[in-house]
Amino acid sequence: MADGPTQDQDLDRDLPALAERLCAAAGRARPLDWQPLAGGRNNRVDRLALADGTAAVLKRYFHHPSDSRDRLGAEWRFTSHAWGLGLRSVPEPLAADWDLKAGLYAFVPGERPRTEDIDSAHVLAAAAFVCAVNVGPPPDESTPPASEACFSLAEHLAVIDRRVERLGRLDPRAPYGDEAAALLSRDLIPQWQAVKAKVMADCRAAGIAIERALDAEETILSPSDFGFHNSLWDDSGQGVFLDFEYAGRDDVAKLVGDFLSCPEVPVAEAHRQTFMDAVAEGLAFDAEGRARIALLVPAYRVKWACIALNDFLPQQEIRRRFAGGRDRAERCAKQLEVARSLVA
């Protein structure tokens, strides 16, 4: 008996009708053609060529019983909020299909920057975006939390503890699995133990209680997974920020730690303090808030080393296949080098 259609084939078969329906709902011209866009790790993203010569982006979000996060809901809420504030540094949200976990957005031209091209203007623009999207009252408990949101120093440490522990279940069949396991036991775990001990000691020395829950005014609406890897810039130097599927209420210290630690388009050392100062000043954080941000930056470097090794976990392969990712051996080899550089 022949095998039935795969999930990928089902998605490709359903794309024309879905694209036409969402374009009609958004009042846009009919789609004539579509091409996959590279770069998505968790989702399938296609550029739609419309009959009037314009373009749109159709994003179909990963969802699975093992990962129940509402990626569409998080991105749609955040992008709609930013667009409603008059910010044009996000793609315009056009229409959504909540049953099929799909969103239609305006197409944004531009190029992802290279690390060597990023200057203080880029960094200050990123900080200004974070501050602008947080104009007005701070988020309250009615705002859904970001993915892996942290509302105390203890929660930050616990999130990374869980990530390190989860890496104890590396897939033995993964390419370069032995090298990944050796890096974990020889380097990453000892480094995390040392970093965690230093954070706790520094907190005690500064009189900061790691269990204290943040007040509402100490939290922000965070774009999450925020960095230049999720941005496009045009020739005039104007940037647009993308991919808010993990967005929500969170501690600004996590946003800063992620921004400064993400290895895809890293921020040069010369600009790191500029970003921290601009965000802290723009959001009017006090001395303790600034200290919390600085304390956690080394911990987030360890977190991103863990993220790099996620490709060696069995369940990650499901998401990568959904997103149409490249060959697993090639991906694992690259991510192993990223993890090595982060823990070096």
Image: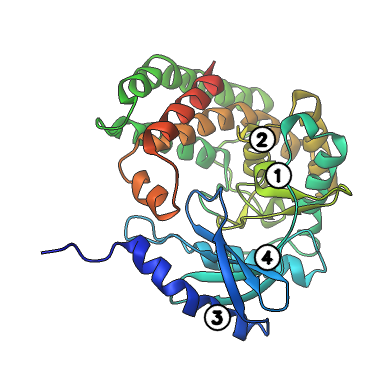
* Circle nearer the viewer, 3 or 1: 3
Residue annotated with mark 3: 20
Q: CA distance from mark 3 to mark 2?
A: 35 Å
Residue annotated with mark 2: 265
| Quarter of the picture holding the C terminus | top right
Residue 79: mark: 4
> With respect to residue 30, does 107 lie above or below?
above
Q: Say whether disc 3 or disc 1 marks the residue closer to the N-terminus.
A: 3
Q: Amino acid at mark 3?
A: Glu
At numbered mark 4, what does the secondary structure look like: helix, strand or loop? helix
Would you say 211 lies left or right of 109 here?
A: left
Asked if the residues shown at circle 1 and circle 2 are in contact, with their CB atoms under 8 angstroms apart, the answer is: yes
- The picture quadrant where one finds residue 56 is bottom right
> With respect to residue 324, does 257 lie above or below?
above
Q: CA distance from mark 2 to mark 4?
A: 22 Å
Pick the front one: 273 or 112:
112
* Circle nearer the viewer, 2 or 4: 2
Q: Say whether disc 4 or disc 3 marks the residue closer to the N-terminus.
A: 3
Residue 112: mark: 1
Mark 1 residue crowding within 10 angstroms, few (<14) / some (14–19) / many (20+):
some
| Quarter of the picture holding the N terminus | bottom left
Q: Amino acid at mark 4?
A: Thr
Q: Amino acid at mark 2?
A: Val
* Circle nearer the viewer, 3 or 2: 3
